[in-house]
Image (tube, helix red, strand yellow):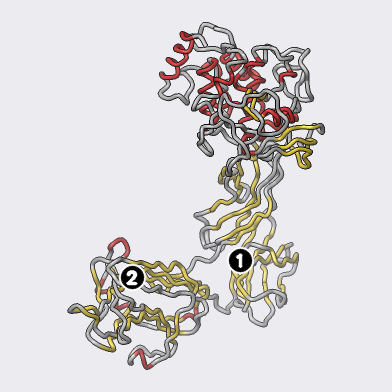
Amino acid sequence: MNVLYRLLILSFICSTNGLAQEPKSYYDRAEGLRGFELKTALKEIIDDVDDGYGLPYHIDQGYASLFEAFASERSGDTDIYYENDGTVLDMYSEVPDDNETYTYSHYINQCGNYSQEGDCYNREHLVPQSTFHRASPMRNDYFHIIPTDGYVNGIRSNFPFGEVEQPNYISSNSSKRGLNTFPGYYGTVFEPIDEFKGDIARAVLYFAIRYEDEFNSSWNKNEVLTDNPQEFYKDWYLKLLLKWHLKDPVSQKEIDRNTNGFNYQGNRNPLVDHPEYVIEIWGNVDNQAPTPPNNLKANLITSNSFELSWQPATDLIGIQEYIIEQDHVEIAQVSSKHLNYTIMDLTPETLYNIRVFAVDASGNVSEPSENLEVLTHIKPDTILNEDFEDCTQVDQNFVTVMEQNRFDWECRSSFGVDDSQAYVINSYQNGETQESKTWLITSRQIDFEKYEAQKMSFWVSARYGNTELELLYSSTYDGLGNPSNFEWIDVPNISIPLHPESNSSLFSFNANAIDISDISGKVYFAFRYDTTSGKAATQWTIDDILITGEQLLSSQRITNAGFKLYPNPLKNSKLHMDFNNNQHKRIELFDMTGKKVWFKNTYLRKCEENLDQLEKGVYFVKVSQGDTSSTKRLILK
């Protein structure tokens, strides 16, 4: 390379605050353009003409010097990305997650003759030389020429790239040759591994930009070229390259190779600097919409939110994003990398209609997914809530009972969640554990007959020792006598872990909305602390105790927007519904996941239905009449 020209290029690179960036103003002429206008503007930027803008331009360095360009430490053709061993990075033999069968050192074992893989490496033209009759500067252009094993290079020959399901040849890194299965062409093709498909696609598309003017009708079409220098490639090949481009984004290896090419011959691959140019130029070749997302589900349903999940849509080129629609109004767009979305700030006991659409990189929108109807849960009522922030009011919710010794629960100004006020017990004194048994018990019975779906939350922390903190409940305790004289049962689904070490380290445990709905009747809850069995004393702290539940409906008739529903809860009885008119009505039942389990159309003012076929649980009844609908919760016992 001419020394003065190299210095000119380097001065432009250094002015951009980093070797990975293009020179300032390099792509100014392309700003705001799309389609073939953008393609032509980029061609003018990277071609071999000094057009007076004062920017570097493509200087053909000849064919022999390519080996030198490959050998640069950060050329993208030297392996500092996988094994980091400085060998030749050959995209036809590199195994990204393992060791290769063979490697080459730069300048050593250049082809020459070969009879099998591993004999030597040479220069692979990603756009075959036969396409342009070995003419320059195409034959010498670094951006579409890579170092590869000579034997695999020969196997690839001048076949186009494609996708293969039944290969007749597989290289040592699983590159394949065989009949094409990508729609539009059915001849023999060569398929590299997924790791390098984007690299190859952007190099081949670069060629279509750079050589728009050099293209002529005498070139060998090889089933991929058109007769139009702007379109350059046939639609099937463009769709394949666009797919690979989207599936395998620009890597650091490509960025380094782009900079090395700029140092070497003075121009750049615009599609590495600006990957978005690919769709802006060729996105119009894709006019086929993706398939709809499928298997749309609602998970983690609460009174004001739920999480959506779905299976991915498919597209010939690639999905760009998903659109979430709630009640026929778009509420969100999410990247194709995500197959879930949480909808929040909803209204309790409300039916929502959800659909999801897929959008591909060319802006084609799929048909909607199947409609999903989701009913939010009833907003739970607070049964008990104690954060210990007012020590004078704690006795409204809890009392302490000492059975042995004088150590008792006490309110502290710290130790709680975020060092807030909390209740603490510790029977360690004078350098040793004191025998103690003490209880923290709810000051009143909690009547669970009025609730369902009860949940309990609390926070505890521990220091020292190995004393258990037990969480119990009792339906026999009378609130007056010695608690040990009554039957106490472990609260279901909650086990407070022991402090893990006998030292001063702090251990905390958070029980968050644990299901305790197996508890029924009127009960007391208690935390019991007992060191009488000889266990080392632990300092236990309790904070933020919360019990919630959903109030059961009364057995009286429930009126909701023009219809009555009774009895509710329903047990071994027919469901009765009374309406205020004899116009057409559609009645639908949904389970808690939003799945429709029963429906009926009727004109009657009164309706009786036997729902014995349904399992016990909570359902929602939706009555639609004209453009209006009403929903009510129904409990089957």
- The tag on residue 592 is 1
Q: Is residue 249 left or right of residue 505?
A: right
Precedes in sequence: disc 2 or disc 1:
2
Q: Position of residue 315 (x, y in %)?
A: 70, 40
Q: CA distance from mark 2 to mark 1?
A: 43 Å
Q: Position of residue 25 (x, y in %)?
A: 48, 17
Q: Amino acid at mark 1?
A: Met
Element type at mark 2: loop
Query: At x 31% / y 73%, what residue is drawn?
Result: 540
Quarter where residue 462 is shown: bottom left
Q: Is residue 54 left or right of residue 66?
A: left
- The tag on residue 516 is none
- Vertically, is 330 above or below 58? below
Residues 633 and 526: in front is: 526
Quarter where residue 547 is shown: bottom left
Q: Position of residue 163 (x, y in %)?
A: 73, 37
The 10 Å Cα crowd at callout 2, few under 14, some 14 to 19, many 20 or more, is few
Can residue 575 be seen in this snapshot? yes
- Vertically, is 336 above or below 588? above
Query: At x 81% / y 32%, what residue is drawn?
Result: 187
Q: Position of residue 155 (x, y in %)?
A: 74, 30
User: Which-is-in-front pick, marks 2 and 1?
Assistant: 2
- Vertically, is 401 above or below 265? below
Image marks 2 and 1: residues in contact by CB distance under 8 Å: no
| Mark 2 lies on residue | 501
Q: Amino acid at mark 2?
A: Glu
Query: At x 25% / y 76%, what residue is drawn?
Result: 410
The C terminus: image quadrant: bottom right
Can residue 205 be seen in this snapshot? no
What count of labels does the image hold? 2
